[in-house]
Amino acid sequence: MFKKNFLIIALQAVVISAFIMIAAGSGENLSSDQAYDAGHKIGEGIGTLMNN
Amino acid sequence: MILSVTTLLLLIGVGIYFFFRTPIIAFSKLHIDSGEYIACNTNNPLVYFMVFCLPDALWYMSLLLVQTFFIEEKGWLNRFLVGVAISLPFLLETGQYFGCVSGTFDWFDIITYCLTLIIFLLCSRKIFLLLHSKQS
């Protein structure tokens, strides 16, 4: 009984981990240009806030 | 049967990412070049749903379908893990909202997950009947 419960928990842990990995892997891989643009926009936003 | 459907749903989701989405982390880690992805008019709500919401809905439906194997098993740890699995997308979105998890928080994702959960709950009786008919 204990062995069965342990197996179920282990299997469930594997399933949840796999789905978390799929979710993490579906994140957008920004290109260097996009990363530069994003950084530039954040910089502009901070600059605007400081000026105000 | 359920595992086949789960795999199929995930493959459809991967296909949408492969053809219609900008390069994603998983593909770059696996050194898969999806090349030029198909640009589509995301101003159209239906297209937006197909490209951005449907993969999330398919991913969550797969997760819920897998949970049907565990949901009737006893033990508090198993129940806890089933609860974690069902609330997983909401936990990830909350993490994204507070910046603890990489990715962008999106209300459309939350709505998509809620709709998927509702559809699953509406169909759950049939799914359990299917599962038990296969077991007996």
Image (cartoon, coloured by chain):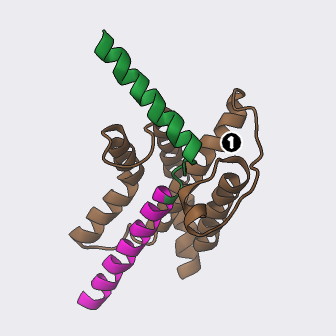
> What residue do we see at 39% from left, 43% from top?
B93
- Does the image show residue A1? no
- Residue A26 in view: yes
Residue range in magenta is A1-24
Chain A appears what colour?
green
Tell me if residue B77 comes above or below residue A23 in the rendering: below
The verdict on residue A8 being magenta is yes
Asked if residue A45 is among those painted magenta in the image, a careful observer would answer no
Q: Nearer the viewer, residue A6 or B127?
A: A6
Q: Residue furthest top?
A: A52
Quarter in which the N terminus of chain B is drawn = bottom right
Q: Circle 1: is it few (<14), some (14-19), or many (20+) Cα within 10 Å?
A: some
Which residue is depicted at the point 56% across and 40% down?
A34
- What residue sits 62% from the left and 68% below the top? B31
Q: Residue at x 76, y 51 (%)?
A: B36
The correct choice, above or below, for B93 with respect to B78 in the image is above
- Up/down of B14 relative to B20, above or below: below
Colour applied to chain B: brown
